[in-house]
Amino acid sequence: MEHQPNPIEPPDVTPENAGLPTDKAHSAPEKTTSPFENVVLPNETAFPVEEAVSFTEKVANPTVETTFSDEQAASATEKTAFPSWETVSPSENFTAPPPPPPAEVPPVVPIQGEVVRPALPKEKSNLFLRVVTALIGIPIVAGLVWHIGPTTFNLVIAILALLSLRELGGALRQGGFALVRGLAYPALLVLLFAQRFTAGGSRAGALLIWILPFVLLIGLLVEGVLRYPRQQRLSLQSIALTLLSTLYAGLFVFVILLRALTWPDFAAEPDFSFTPPGEAMPQLGPSLLWLTLIAVWSGDTVAYFAGRMMGKEKLTPLSPGKTWEGAVAGLTATIAVCVPMARLLEIELRHGLALGVLIALAAPLGDLAESFWKRELGVKDLGGCLPGHGGILDRCDSLLFAVFAVYIYAQLLLVG
């Protein structure tokens, strides 16, 4: 009976039916080439697969002992961790590639309600121009304080105030706002010369000074209402900044009021002539104004040079050039100047010391207030009519706050 093959049992495989040569049927199988024989990195750097396999086993099972050296482990680590770097042999010096360039910072997109302040231009030192301007200006200011009459003096101060308001209008325009000139300039002139109506205790003049800011506010709001249907409307920001600018420039009125002060037992209308100390009591107003000027200039100068030489701690981001060391030096210099100046001008020592402290605190605040204006509007100086100093307000910012403080002190403790 013929043997039938079992369909489940596989048939016998012979070299003939397998299609292999007869002489290789019983030889050892050929060693096939592994696809991982040589691992090619992205920069076409190859290393043997044995190192990678051994390194992988050592990482996966630290307790298994391996036969490769530390140099091989380090080489495999570099190749595995940094596949895009050029691989070097352990005997060569490995030089790390340069760090990647910093990523570009995307522009700041303000969220609703956030105020993005423009960057200030880099400040430059104009020391020579500052010194020359001061040497020319100090004698002129001294002549204005001591040797001219009240009408001429008031006119000069009014011109300075109007120029200051013009500087503020230019800065507002650079910041994208508008100064309502038709209301700001008349209101400033009324404020400057209203003190003439207060002489002799006039109630009408005093009332005019008190209600003037509110009259200006109502006028600006009415102007905004009338211009609303037009294409060029008046924004609420422009209304607020016009009112603020007028009052800020209106601080010059206290320079006029301070110079007009007299001692209680003196005549109401002083002659403003300079009297050498010791011969007779000098006029109170010119003495206080000159004391304030010298104290502000001294404190500002000492603070400037002290900050440049030994300043380290920044005072405020509003003015990057100001330091705590300069502020303390300026405060000390202001008090040190006020005490002997007060005695020279026939002012009591206790008042001289109190005025020194008052000016030392008020003057830097005035400087920082003007820096706040410039920082918010993104300008370096409010003007440029004074070489090395900027504009009128750049030079008089500290003085305006100091004069206001001295006038209030004198009214409360010296005159009243």
Image: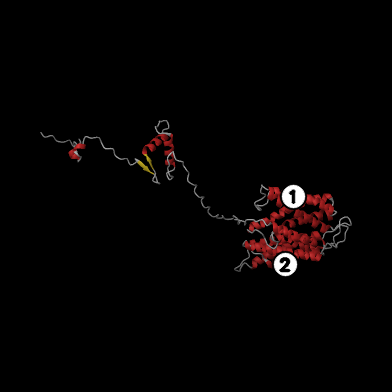
- Circle 1 crowding by C-alpha within 10 Å: few under 14, some 14–19, many from 20: many
Q: Is residue 56 left or right of residue 333?
A: left
Does residue 209 appear in this view? yes
Q: Is residue 20 left or right of residue 34?
A: left
Q: Amino acid at mark 1?
A: Leu
Marks counted in the figure total: 2
The residue nearer to you, when weighing 114 against 68, is: 68
**Residue 247, percent from left and from top:** 72, 61
- Sequence order check: which comes first, mark 2 or mark 1? 2
Tell me if residue 95 comes above or below residue 121 in the rendering.
Answer: above
**Residue 302, percent from left and from top:** 73, 51
* Residue 227, image quadrant: bottom right
- Circle 2 crowding by C-alpha within 10 Å: few under 14, some 14–19, many from 20: some
Q: Which mark is residue 331?
A: 1
* Residue 293, image quadrant: bottom right
Does residue 204 appear in this view? no
Tell me if residue 231 comes above or below residue 351 in the rendering.
Answer: below
Quadrant in which the C terminus appears? bottom right
